[in-house]
Amino acid sequence: MEAESLRSKTEKSSMEQPNSSDAARVLRNRRKWRTISFTLIGVLVFIIILILILAFTVFKAKRPVTTIDDVSLRDLKFSVNLARLQVLLNATVDVDLSITNPNKVGFKFKDSNAELNYRGEQVGEVPIPAGKISADQTVPMNVTLTLMADRLISDAKFFSDVMSGELPLSTRTEIPGKVNVMNLFRIRVVSTSSCDFTVFLFNSSVGDQSCKYKTQF
């Protein structure tokens, strides 16, 4: 009787011992995976914080600027018929401009155009093809605008401006594009520049130049 009782206790103890070992192993595995999970979450949070810091400091989007460096006149021809109060005018305006990208990433801009205006009315236009400007780069451009004199005839002030020898004109460029920050943030940008100037007809020169620049996000 005692032998059977001892044998039963021994078998019960041998059955409980593996169960206890399995429970400890499961507990260790849980702790291991929990540690790995917390480590991965911590690394992921660190990477996200680092990206945000870089995006708002080093790679923070800055305003690309379009600058008109020079406006010059060539091929100016004009004549006045006083009997008919008629003016014949042909002129070509060369505009040297540059686009500066101060960002640490590239700036892609779309197709746009440059306009030549007389007292608010468009009298010339030339397309500016799309392109890309690398980080911290300035790209020079030259556009040639031909004055469409037929659009000036209907303006009542045109004849008096020609007779005075001074023709007020202006140029305007609007270049839309995007700044791509770390392939995560795409920021739309529109860079606008405009210049008012006077064409002195009697000596074929340009003066009184005043320019304004604006960039919008």
Image (tube, rainbow, N blue to C red):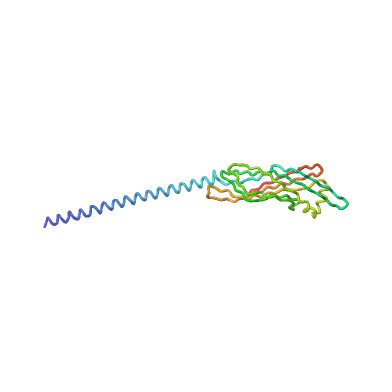
Instruction: Quarter of the image for the N terminus: give it.
Output: bottom left
Indicate the position of residue 182 as horizontal and vertical percent values.
53, 47
Q: How many marks?
A: 0
8 horizontally vs 145: left or right: left
In the foreground, 149 or 202:
149
Residue reaching furthest to the left? 1
In the rendered image, the residue lying farthest to the right is: 83
Residue 101 percent coordinates (x, y): 61, 44
Q: Residue furthest bottom?
A: 1
Name the side, left or right, on which 156 lies relative to 26: right
Residue at x 59% of width, y 50% of height: 178
Q: Which picture quadrant has residue 98?
A: top right
Determine which quarter of the picture holds residue 103: top right
In the rendered structure, the answer to whether residue 31 lies left or right of residue 55 reads left
Image location (x, y in percent) of residue 187? 58, 50
Would you say 152 lies left or right of 189 here?
right
Spot occupied by residue 207 in the image (x, y as percentages of width and height): 76, 42
